[in-house]
Image (cartoon, rainbow, N blue to C red):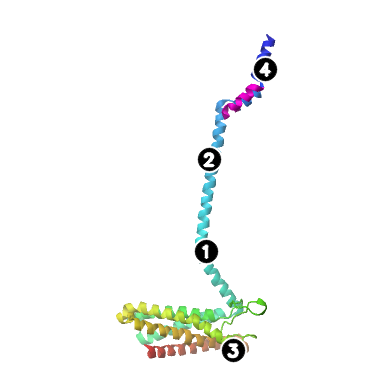
Amino acid sequence: MATITAQTTKTKTTPRMVRGAAGLPRLARRFAACASRGAALPPSRALGRTKSRDLDATRAISLDRDGSGERRRGEGKALDMVPLGSAVAAVQQGLADRVAADEEFLFKLIWEVLQDQVIIVLTVVASCGLPSFWTTEQMANACLLHATAFFNDILLMWFLAATKSPHSSGAGRGGKKKKGLSHMFEPSATATIGDRAKCWVDKFLLYAPLGLATALLSSVVMGRFLGPEASNPLYLCKVGLVGLIHLGVSSNTRYQMINGVDVLYYRVLDKKAARSATIASRLVNQVVGGKLFLLLSALIL
């Protein structure tokens, strides 16, 4: 009897039957492996482990997809903010360069804008009376004058100001960048008369289109109040020519001279006296610029 039992047990665990289980499905092979080790794995437990692994894999894939989606959405928002951030960074860098080259730049800029706005207020009030009695046309004209003067003053001050970093792409000797002139009278040991003349031409090419654009824009806005005459192509050409000459030639020349005398003021006078002198010269410049604009308008329009 013992012999029969031993043979029976030996028959159940022969290698042939284990190899025969290799053709069974995965679950059957697991049962065969457990049986060969002398242990049995309950079917419910094996199925539970399989389902648990599948569920964990599904959750991992889902989390990965959600995370990727969140990252993509975050990257998309960051890319949308790139143009605005680049513009702000460029303005900050430009302001830092100008203040590093001239610590009085902010004072000059703020005073120039405020002075021009006050002059416009006094001029309009003197010609049209108190704002409470203005017509719609007069109110629109005053607002347009303020906006145009505000942006023109900033552009003139900004692009004629000295900067610490090079703003010209020209190459000098040895392949090094050559720092361009910010205005004709900027101190420089290497600048020639030709370089200073080229500076004026470069600023003309910058300011002339701006003057043309602002004049045409002003004319289009005021055309609503001035009637069909303001939309006449010949009249628009004349208005554009006035703006081009005024900003490209008159303002360009006058503000370059102002920057030149400012260099002289801050070189020979103390800080308070230099500030007083630049305020006075800028006031005269505003009056002269207004007179020249009226003269130019009368000649062309």
Q: Closer to the camera: disc 1 or disc 4?
A: 4
Read off the residue under disc 4.
10
Residue 83 visible? The answer is yes
Cα separation, mark 2 vs mark 3, equals: 76 Å
Kindly state the secondary structure of the residue where label 1 is placed.
helix
Magenta-colored span = 15-29
Q: Assess whether mark 3 and mark 2 are in contact (beta carbons under 8 angstroms).
A: no
Sequence-earlier tag: 2 or 3: 2
Looking at the rendering, which quadrant does residue 105 occupy? bottom right
Read off the residue under disc 2.
58
Q: Nearer the viewer, residue 226 or 8?
A: 8
Cα separation, mark 1 vs mark 4, equals: 77 Å
Looking at the rendering, which quadrant does residue 215 occupy? bottom left
Q: Nearer the viewer, residue 227 or 20?
A: 20
Identify which residue is drawn at 32% across, 79% down. Answer: 225
Q: Left or right of 203: which side holds 19?
A: right
Residue 288 at x, y = what percent?
A: 46, 90
Main secondary structure found in the magenta portion: helix
Read off the residue under disc 3.
193
Read off the residue under disc 1.
82
Sequence-earlier tag: 4 or 2: 4
Kindly state the secondary structure of the residue where label 4 is placed.
helix
* Amino acid type shown at disc 1: Val
Residue 232 at x, y = what percent?
A: 32, 81
Sequence-earlier tag: 1 or 4: 4
Q: Left or right of 89: which side holds 16?
A: right
* Amino acid type shown at disc 2: Thr
